[in-house]
Image: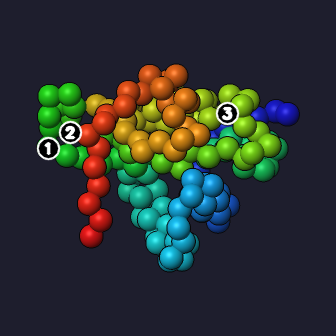
Amino acid sequence: MEITYRKLTENDLDVFIRMRITQLREEGATEDVDLVPPLTDYYHRHLVDGTFVSWLALDGEKIVGTSGMSFVEKPPYFSCPSGRIGLLSSMYTDPDYRRTGIAKELLRRVTEEARAYGCGCVQITASDMGVLLYTDFGFEKNGNFMQYNL
């Protein structure tokens, strides 16, 4: 198994979106809408404007791992004076390739993208499966995260 890494391109979006939906299903999401059109729209727009980047892991030509980083800006605050935040998403490894270091390498690459973009921090809502990966990498829990659905 020779794993290589490269950035996501528009040509990869069909597979990338299928893997994102598989990830959401594994995490227990309830499906009440077709996510393909809004995901396609999102990735097209944000790949073009540079506010989304993804690294992929490949075994030959087969994509076996994905990552994603969206860049957002908020008013600066003390722990993030740039106001730029990386929102980590789409961390997924094909079940046949798990526990081989792929996710850790993808995480390293996308956090470097966030650093290069000028982000002061990276945030994620971690799945139960991902908590160990993120804590080992240095992420800290923020117990005050809340969400209000509109």
Name the mark on residue 83. 2
Name the mark on residue 102. 3
Mark 3 residue type: Ile
- Mark pair 1, 3: CA separation: 34 Å
Q: Is residue 58 left or right of residue 34?
A: right
Judge whether 109 appears above or below 126 on screen: above
* Residue 13 visible somewhere in the drawing: no
Which residue is rendered at x = 59% and y = 40% of the image?
Answer: 129
The image position of residue 96, as x and y in percent, is 80, 43
Q: Nearer the viewer, residue 42 or 34?
A: 34
Image quarter of residue 101: top right
Going from N to C along the chain, the mark reached first, 2 or 3, is: 2
What SS does tag 2 mark? loop
Q: Is residue 70 left or right of residue 32?
A: left
Which residue is rendered at x = 57% and y = 58% of the image?
Answer: 28
Determine contact: label 1, label 2, CB under 8 Å. Answer: yes
Mark 1 residue type: Pro
Name the mark on residue 75. 1
Q: Residues within 10 Å of mark 2 (few under 14, many from 20)?
A: some
Determine contact: label 1, label 3, CB under 8 Å. Answer: no
Which residue is rendered at x = 38% and y = 56% of the image?
Answer: 49
Which residue is rendered at x = 54% and y = 71% of the image?
Answer: 31
